[in-house]
Image (cartoon, rainbow, N blue to C red):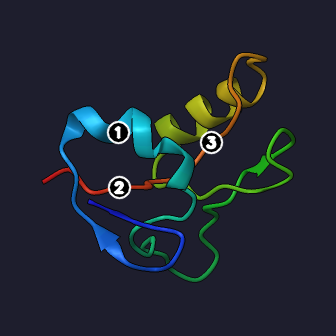
């Protein structure tokens, strides 16, 4: 399930993910946080901040930002049901 650009929730089979990948932009849920916690590495390729929840995710986001084959990064764009 993902949230489409028009704000509606859409449920599609896993196999359809490549066809809807262009619609995946925003996180499907809020990230838990507390005062002083940092969840936003800057992405030079995206020109914006990208949220993460663990240092493992952060490391992967930084590595992906340097990969020329990566055309976009989206933080938690869908639910697995």
Task: Name the residue rendered at 29%, 38% in the picture.
Answer: 16
**Number of residues whose C-alpha sits closer than 10 Å to that of mark 1, classed few (under 14), some (14–19) or many (20 or more):** some
Mark 1 and 2 residues: CB-CB less than 8 Å, in contact? yes
**Count of marks placed on residues:** 3
| Residue 8 screen position, x and y as percent | 38, 78
Question: Disc 3 or 2, which lies upstream in sequence?
Answer: 3
Task: Name the residue rendered at 27%, 57% in the picture.
Answer: 79
Task: Name the residue rendered at 67%, 38% in the picture.
Answer: 72
* Residue position marked by numbered label 1 in the rendering: 17
* Residue position marked by numbered label 3 in the rendering: 73
Mark 2: secondary structure: loop
| Residue 64 screen position, x and y as percent | 66, 26
The mark closer to the camera, 3 or 1, is: 1
Quick check: 35 above or below 19? Answer: below
* Front one among 59 and 17: 17
* Front one among 81 and 20: 20
């Amino acid at each position: 399930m993902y949230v489409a650009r028009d704000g509606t929730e859409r449920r599609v089979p896993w196999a359809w993910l490549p066809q809807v990948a262009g619609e995946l932009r925003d996180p499907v849920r809020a990230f838990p946080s507390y005062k002083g916690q940092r969840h936003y590495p800057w992405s030079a390729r995206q020109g914006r901040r990208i949220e993460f929840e663990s240092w493992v995710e952060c490391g992967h986001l930084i590595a992906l930002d340097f990969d020329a084959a990566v055309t976009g990064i989206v933080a938690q764009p869908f639910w697995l049901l």
